[in-house]
Amino acid sequence: MDWQMRAIRGATTASENTIETIQEVVTELLNELENRNQFQPKDIISVTFSVTRDLDAVFPAAIARARPGWDNVAMLDVQQMHVEGSLQRCIRFLIHAYLPASASIHHIYLRNAASLRPDWSLPQIQASQQAVKSKV
């Protein structure tokens, strides 16, 4: 089987800046990531989490590191560049992983973050069918 380094994007939003809320939404985001993409934590090269400046109660990487198999993944938390009027209380990730070249990638955009990439917040098959229809 041919394997390649692939990138997976995702994002979600938190309703408030508390440890409990951020833990809930990061867990939901990573659960969806694992459910929709066929990989194991051992396949992950690195994860970069970014958060908007209004979220500072807890590091998303600390939440991810507590997941089974994620304790040896290289992770980094950074603050997202602030742009006036941009989505608030947003947590994003960029994951690099070794995956089969033929594997479908499902980028995960949940809650209000679905507005960032409406094309990726839909199931991938529906998104590609809509793109074909719009070209006709």
Image (spheres, grey):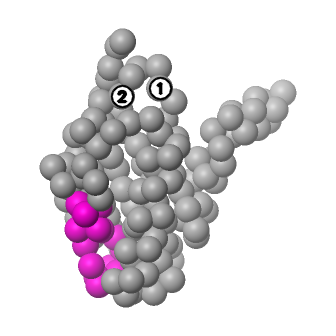
Give the amino acid type for the residue marked by disc 1 in the picture: Ala
Rendered image quadrant of residue 115: bottom right
Q: Residue 112, percent across and down?
A: 58, 70
For the residues labelled 2 and 1, say whether their Cβ atoms are less than 8 Å apart: yes
126 lies above or below 136: below
- The magenta span reads 51-66
Q: As rendered, which of 106 and 55 lies closer to the eye?
A: 106
Rendered image quadrant of residue 52: bottom left
Q: Residue 70, percent across and down?
A: 24, 52
Kindly identify which residue carries mark 2. Answer: 99
Give the amino acid type for the residue marked by disc 2 in the picture: Leu
Q: Is residue 83 left or right of residue 35?
A: left
Identify the residue shown where x is 58% and y is 68%. Answer: 111
39 lies above or below 25: above
Identify the residue shown where x is 30% and y is 30%. Answer: 98
From the image, which quarter does the N terminus lie in?
top left
Q: Which label belongs to residue 80?
A: none
Check if residue 59 falls in the magenta segment.
yes
| Kind of element beneath mark 2 | strand
Q: Could you tell me if residue 81 is visible in this image? A: no
Identify the residue shown where x is 41% and y is 20%. Answer: 101
Q: As rendered, which of 41 and 90 lies closer to the eye?
A: 41
Q: As rendered, which of 12 and 27 lies closer to the eye?
A: 27
Q: As rendered, which of 21 and 71 lies closer to the eye?
A: 71
| Kind of element beneath mark 1 | loop
Q: Is residue 18 left or right of residue 118?
A: left
Kindly identify which residue carries mark 1. Answer: 103
Identify the residue shown where x is 18% and y is 55%. Answer: 71
Q: Residues within 10 Å of mark 2 (few under 14, many from 20)?
A: many
Q: Residue 86, percent across and down?
A: 49, 73
